[in-house]
Structure formats: structure tokens, C-alpha cells
Image (tube, grey):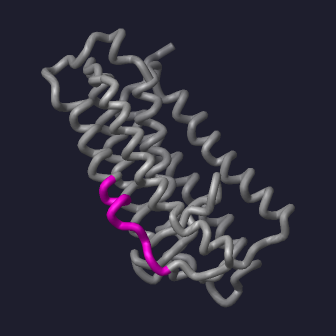
């Protein structure tokens, strides 16, 4: 079976991410017509439990579909993870672009949105998920390119610890307003310090793992631990 080039895979990952982002936006357009005919805003219109359960299932199914495509994008765990990052980032960016051109929403990058519902409600200005999405696309592309060129990333305990802390800070920031949303109130303050800390730390850890060593990185055995 002929090996598909990295460039071709990257193109098709972006194509799939764009199509999937459009599909996600289309679903949200329908939901807003049903629950926010006057325009989306807080406090949220809480759907009946059955519909809410379906929505939670849809969000989980979205992640499964993205990961499923990423699993076909390469043979190593790092390449597949890079593909997942690209898909997730493109999907999220296109989602907001479609909503803007169809609904004229968000009015600005500082407009608040509910980002996710699993395991708690995520909320924040649109700028916050967009910055994460752009970071994922750039880092994912670099990751795939470096690993396929033969580089093996540094995988020490403190690298994993820093990555975990970065993710934890971002999750804390995104889910900080869960209580207000659950109480049907309007969130107004976003925890920028943990958010920016998580984003900067994540980029620092990524750079050390993939660029701070001599070309070739660790051995193939140690570098493939994912």
C-alpha cells in the first residue's frame, strides 16, 4: 500500500476539519433557532433533560470522530496526536467563522460563549478557545513534521508534569464559571491568569520537548511513549 505523503495528509486533515467545523456550526444554527430566536445570550435556555442528554452525547461523539480520523493519519502515537490537535483546532476555528458569517455572531472576540458541557460547563470569551485552537493547529503541524523527519521528543517526568499542569490550568479557567451557569446567571469575569499561565506553560513544554535538543531527540524507544 502506497505511503501517503505528509503534505497530502495535512491537506486532508484540514479539509476534514473545515467540513466538520461547518457541520458543527450548522447544528448550532438550528439549536439557536429553536432556543434563542431573538439571539444567543446569557442566562442560558436549559433544554429538557432528554434533549440535554442527546447534546452531551453529540459532544462526546464529536471527540470520538476526530480521534478516529486522527488514528488513520500516521503510524506513531505522536503523529496521531498531532493530527488530533490539527483537526480539533481547525474544527473550532471554522465553527466560529461559520457562525459569524451566517448569524453575525460573535459580535467580537470578547463575546462570551458556552464552549463545552463535559464534564462541567465551559465558558469564556470567544478569544479564549480561538487562541487554544490556533495553538493546537500550529503545534500539531510541527509535531507531525518533526516526528516524521525522525525526531524523537524529550519525554521526562517533568515534561509530562508540565503538560498536565498546563492542561489543568486551562480546564480550571474554562470551567470556573460553571456554578454561575448552573444557577442560570450571567458570567462576567474570566480567570485570565490561570488561562494565560496554562497557554504559556503549554507552549514552553512543547518547545522543550520538540525543539530544545540536538536533532534526533531521544531514542526511538523512549520517544514513542505516548
Q: Residue at x 19, y 32 (%)?
A: 211
Q: Residue at x 40, y 75 (%)?
A: 109
**As drawn, which residue projects farthest toward the bottom?**
38
**As drawn, which residue projects farthest toward the left?**
214
Q: Main secondary structure of the magenta part?
A: helix
Is 189 within the magenta?
yes
Q: Which quadrant would residue 66 be assigned to in this image?
A: top right
143 vs 61: above or below: above
Indicate the position of residue 106 as horizontal and vertical percent values: 48, 78
Any part of residue 141 in sight: yes
Indicate the position of residue 123 as horizontal and vertical percent values: 53, 67
Q: Which quadrant would residue 190 be assigned to in this image?
A: bottom left
26 vs 64: above or below: below
In this image, 151 relative to 49: left or right?
Answer: left
Indicate the position of residue 23 as horizontal and vertical percent values: 62, 58
Q: Residue at x 48, y 80 (%)?
A: 188
Q: Which residues are magenta?
A: 188-197
Q: Residue at x 49, y 61 (%)?
A: 174
Indicate the position of residue 169 as horizontal and vertical percent values: 41, 52
Is 194 within the magenta?
yes
In this image, 182 relative to 4: left or right?
Answer: right
> Nearest the camera: 146 or 169?
169
In this image, 155 relative to 73: left or right?
Answer: left
The C terminus sits in image quarter: top left
> Nearest the camera: 137 or 217?
217
> Nearest the camera: 41 or 79?
41
Any part of residue 93 in sight: no
Total residue callouts: 0
In this image, 197 relative to 19: left or right?
Answer: left
Amino acid at each position: 500500500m502506497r505511503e501517503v505523503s505528509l503534505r497530502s495528509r495535512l491537506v486532508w486533515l484540514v479539509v476534514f476539519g473545515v467540513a466538520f467545523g461547518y457541520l458543527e456550526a450548522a447544528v448550532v444554527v438550528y439549536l439557536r433557532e429553536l432556543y434563542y430566536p431573538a439571539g444567543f445570550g446569557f442566562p442560558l435556555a436549559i433544554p429538557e433533560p432528554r434533549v440535554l442528554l442527546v447534546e452531551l452525547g453529540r459532544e462526546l461523539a464529536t471527540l470520538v470522530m476526530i480521534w478516529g480520523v486522527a488514528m488513520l493519519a500516521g503510524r506513531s502515537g505522536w503523529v496521531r496526536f498531532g493530527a488530533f490537535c490539527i483537526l480539533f483546532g481547525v474544527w473550532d476555528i471554522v465553527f466560529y467563522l461559520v457562525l459569524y458569517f451566517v448569524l453575525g455572531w460573535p459580535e467580537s472576540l470578547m463575546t462570551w460563549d458556552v464552549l463545552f458541557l463535559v464534564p462541567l460547563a465551559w465558558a469564556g470569551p470567544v478569544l479564549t478557545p480561538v487562541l487554544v485552537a490556533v495553538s493546537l493547529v500550529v503545534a500539531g503541524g510541527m509535531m507531525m513534521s518533526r516526528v516524521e523527519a525522525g525526531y524523537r521528543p524529550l519525554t521526562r517526568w517533568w515534561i509530562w508534569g508540565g503538560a498536565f499542569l498546563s492542561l489543568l490550568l486551562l480546564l480550571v479557567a474554562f470551567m470556573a464559571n460553571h456554578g454561575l451557569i448552573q444557577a442560570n446567571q450571567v458570567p462576567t469575569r474570566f480567570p485570565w491568569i490561570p488561562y494565560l499561565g496554562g497557554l504559556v506553560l503549554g507552549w514552553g513544554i512543547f518547545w522543550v520537548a520538540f525543539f530544545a535538543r540536538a536533532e534526533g531527540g531521544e531514542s526511538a524507544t523512549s520517544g514513542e511513549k505516548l
